[in-house]
Amino acid sequence: MKLNLHITKVTIACFILLSTVNLSVKAQEVITLQKAIDRALERNLTIKQAQLTEALSTEDYRQAKNNLLPNLFVNSQGSYNFGRATDQTNLAINNGSFFYNTNSASAQITVFQGGQLRNQIIQNRLLLDADKSNTAKIKNDLILNVVTQYLSILTNQDLVAAAQQQIGVAKITLDRAQKNFDVGNQTLADLSQAKAQQSTAELNLTTAQNQLDLSILVLKQYMEMPPLTPITIEKPDVSKLTVATAYDPQNVLNTALAINPDVVLAQTREKAYLQAIKIAKGGYYPTLSFSGSVVTQYSSTSKAVLGTVQGFQTVNGNINGVPSTIDLPTTTPVFGGTTSFATQLSNNLNQSVGFNLQIPIFNRFFTRTAVRKAKINYENAQVSTQLSKNNLSKTIIQAVWDVQAAEKKYQSMQQTYNANKEAFNVIQERYNVGLVNSLDYNTSLTNLNKSQFDLIQAQYEVVFRSKVIDYYLGNPITL
């Protein structure tokens, strides 16, 4: 009974363990090429940085357009004055303390500034387009990197499978060699060669598995996934893919020059630097602006005038050399309480309009230097554009040659593999009946294994080289 209970516990534990492993396998996310591309575009931090830079350029462009609008300011200032001070509302001298407040509103609009405002709008729009092209360039480069890494994973998966098959063949060969050695039909050297062949096959598997793990890790990095997240790579049937290998380099180049993000980015920046020359030349022209303002004041010493009192003031003078006393009529205002705040604002209201014309005469050659520097930057941008075109031309021609060479290499590797496979089958039959020694057998097996690896790599290289051409043509990259 105790034994049965122990067996039951072990069975349950094994069931739980197998279920956990099964759930872990099922939990692995299947990654297709399109999913890998979408996730990389969604999560990649370099793209997010480019998009933030693009957002900043958008704000600069909006501000350049807003610079055409007038400035409007409202100002209110108040102060307590102690001691002898002038009351600005009536220009009277006060020896006591009083509160003074002034309020103003002003507006100013630039009518002409040498075309700098308009040219700045155009340049900022071009810079925004350049940042958009840079974002597109980063996305396209990322897509190509993801596709390259995806194909690398598929290649390494096939290499692992081939290495596992080689281990199976090597084990069968070693088992046969051991039996023949035990009955005295083969020497120790033959047995050692069989063991070495199995060790080589195991080393090939280890190398292929390491390369596969590394390529999967790099793909996870492109997708911004945790390195230890288990994933499964969907494997399409590469043999059924329709891959184009015949391209006209000139046609590919003409299409790429019109859409390639590197060239578009360089051309857009060149236009922006050309616009910068016009902005710098605007410094030679005068600036004309119009302004208007409204000002009013309040003072705690300002009194309301209730009326006037007529009277006379005696003045001593001299009339025709005779000293005389004269009574001059006078009008004396009668003040009441302090005038209200609203009344003073209305009574002290002052309005003005004006214009300002600023003509540059000499500014220590600042404008001339700015124009010269802008021209140098434009020439440098022209060189950068030509360099990008030259690099693209070189890359396109090389890519066309590479895809053609990859196709020829694949055909050659296929013939080599078929020949080595036929040769190995013949040698294996003769080896089984003792007509071929182990050295010739192992040599033939090594040649077959190498040709199989070369064929797998050549097959995926054709696909990769073709996808590179699709990238430069602007075609969607799919498998």
Image (cartoon, rainbow, N blue to C red):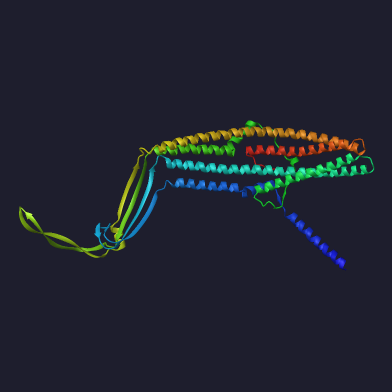
Write down the quadrant of residue 326 in the picture: bottom left
Residue 372: x percent and y percent?
Answer: 45, 35
- Residue at point 41% right, 36% down? 368
Q: Nearer the viewer, residue 75 or 109?
A: 75
Number of residue marks? 0
Horizontal side of 67 relative to 220 (left or right) equals left
| Residue 9, position as x, y percentages in the image | 82, 64
User: Foreground: 41 or 161?
Assistant: 161
The structure residue drawn at horizontal position 39% and vertical position 41%, both measured from the top left corner, is 113
Residue 387's place in the image compared with 354, above or below, is above
Give the residue furthest to the bottom: 1
In depth, the one of 265 and 6 nearer the eye is 6
In the figure, is residue 229 to the left or right of 19? left
Locate residue 339, reporting x and y percent.
Answer: 27, 63
Q: Quadrant of residue 366?
A: top left
Visible in this render: residue 169?
A: no
Q: Which is nearer the eye, 177 or 368? A: 177
Task: Give the quadrant of the N terminus.
Answer: bottom right
